[in-house]
Image (cartoon, grey):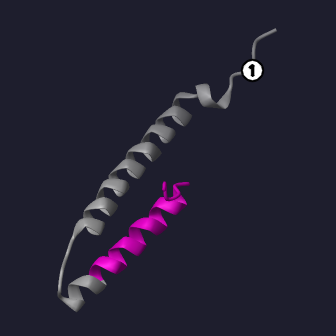
Amino acid sequence: MPKAARPEDDPAVKAAEADRKRRIQALEMTRERVLSERTSSPHRRSALELALATIERELEQLGWSIKL
């Protein structure tokens, strides 16, 4: 009797998971850069807040949560 293949052994599943992890890592680095920016410009601050919200929304869609 042949053994049923586990979904996590599927190369397409492995590739998709690796891609998801890479995207999370890239978004985390971008998030850290945005958080580290300092500005006295209200317009720039608003843009950074919007960028941060967008990044965090994308991360949440990938199953990420803030690590404290």
4 vs 1: above or below: below
Q: Which residue is mark 1?
A: 4
User: Which residue: 76% across, 11% down?
Assistant: 2
In percent of width and height, residue 64 lies at 52, 55
x and y, in percent, of residue 14 in the image: 51, 32
Quarter occupied by the N terminus: top right
Q: Residue at x 45, y 38 (%)?
A: 18
Q: State the residue in front, 67 or 13.
A: 67
Q: Residue furthest bottom?
A: 42
Q: In this rendered view, identify the residue nearer to me: 3 or 17.
A: 17
Residue 47 location in percent, x, y? 28, 82
1 to 30, vertically: above or below: above
Q: In the image, 32: left or right of 59?
A: left
Kind of element beneath mark 1: loop
Residue 4 locus on image (x, y percent) = 74, 20
Which amino acid, mark 1? Ala
Q: Residue at x 75, y 14 (%)?
A: 3
Residue 33 placement: quadrant: bottom left
Q: Main secondary structure of the magenta part?
A: helix
Label tally: 1
User: Circle 1: is it few (<14), some (14-19), or many (20+) Cα within 10 Å?
Assistant: few
Magenta-drawn segment = 47-68
Residue 23 magenta-highlighted = no
Residue at image location 53% in from the left, 57% down from the top: 65
Question: Which image quadrant for residue 49?
Answer: bottom left
